[in-house]
Image: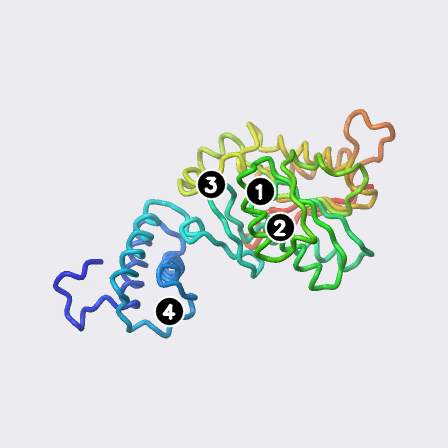
Amino acid sequence: MSDSGSTQSEAWTILRMLQWTTEHLKKQGSPSPRLDAEVLFAHARNCQRIDLYAAFNEEPPESVKAIFRDLVKRRASGEPVAYLVGRKEFFSLSFAVNQACLIPRNETEHIITECIDRLKKAQGPFLIADACTGSGCIAITIAKESQRLGLTASIVATDLSPEALQVAKQNIEQHNVQDRVETFQADLLEPLADSSCDFVLSNPPYVSDLEYQKLDKSVRDYEPKIALVSGPSGMEIIERLVAQAAVKLKPGGWLIFEHSPMIASQCTELLASTATPSGASTPSGPWSDLRTIKDLAGLPRVTVARRP
């Protein structure tokens, strides 16, 4: 994108810059080059994406071009768009993100829909735990959706990372749900009392050590490893989550969590075997109402189970 020798007919209009950038990012391996180009340009121009369509024939000032060129260079090197612009949409809400937390993904929205479907059929008030909250997108979205539905719900959001919790707190304030969402720096469900939760939700680390080496470079180089990798099998943190949920959930409470499609059957087997951690005085039997939810790609992505 050089302006040297350009004539009026060759002016670097917004449309021309978007077309050039789309081709450039496509060659660099971006799976959504046009979308990337538009999001980055809107950020450089400090406008909404839709505003670009009415300004295609405009030639932006050099200051905007300079910002855009830098963003494109960084995107071409693999830096995720969400980190470049500092925001990501999730369930039609906008969330601040940085490299302290995972970028919210569409697959995780299945946790929201499964939880809301069950909230609407039950009697509140509800206590809901969101373990490994990261940006807070699950906890905050549940808070907003339950409020919209006229339901009374309190959400406890936990994360081991203080840096991630700072992002979550920023998003909690932005979405004005301070009265509904409380954060704790803690390991999974530790802050919750036994038999207190109606729902346990989580997008925990579930990537195995071997899988991590095969992840896209843009994920490995930029997203926090602590939020991705569980251990050698990918099941280590899920096993602990299930054991804690068996104690923290009320009888009849729901556990809804995301996992890799590669360990979906292991998650089902784990839940089908027991709902009681070792050392419990009274065995409660296996989890009930087991379901595996497929994502938009048809892959088993979310598991739902009910404590007996």
Q: Residue at x 77, y 33 (%)?
A: 274
Residue 112 drawn above or below residue 243: below
Residue at the farthest top position: 279
Mark closer to the chain start, 3 or 1: 1
Residue 262 drawn above or below residue 104: above
- Mark 2 touches mark 3? (CB < 8 Å): no
* Mark seen at residue 138: 2
Q: CA distance from mark 2 to mark 3?
A: 18 Å
Q: Residue at x 31, y 56 (%)?
A: 67
Colouring scheme, one of rainbow, by chain, secondary structure, one colour: rainbow
Label 3: which secondary element: loop
Kind of residue indicated by mark 1: Leu
Residue 285 located left or right of residue 262? right
Mark in the foreground, 2 or 1:
1
Mark closer to the chain start, 4 or 2: 4
Numbered label tally:
4
Instruction: Locate residue 207, reporting x and y percent.
Output: 54, 36
Q: CA distance from mark 3 to mark 1?
A: 15 Å
Label 4: which secondary element: helix
Q: Residue at x 28, y 63 (%)?
A: 17
Kind of residue indicated by mark 3: Glu
* Mark seen at residue 52: 4
Say which quarter of the image contains residue 120.
bottom right
Residue bearing mark 3: 223
- Classify the position of the N terminus by image quarter: bottom left
Residue bearing mark 1: 165
- Mark 2 touches mark 1? (CB < 8 Å): no
Kind of residue indicated by mark 2: Ile
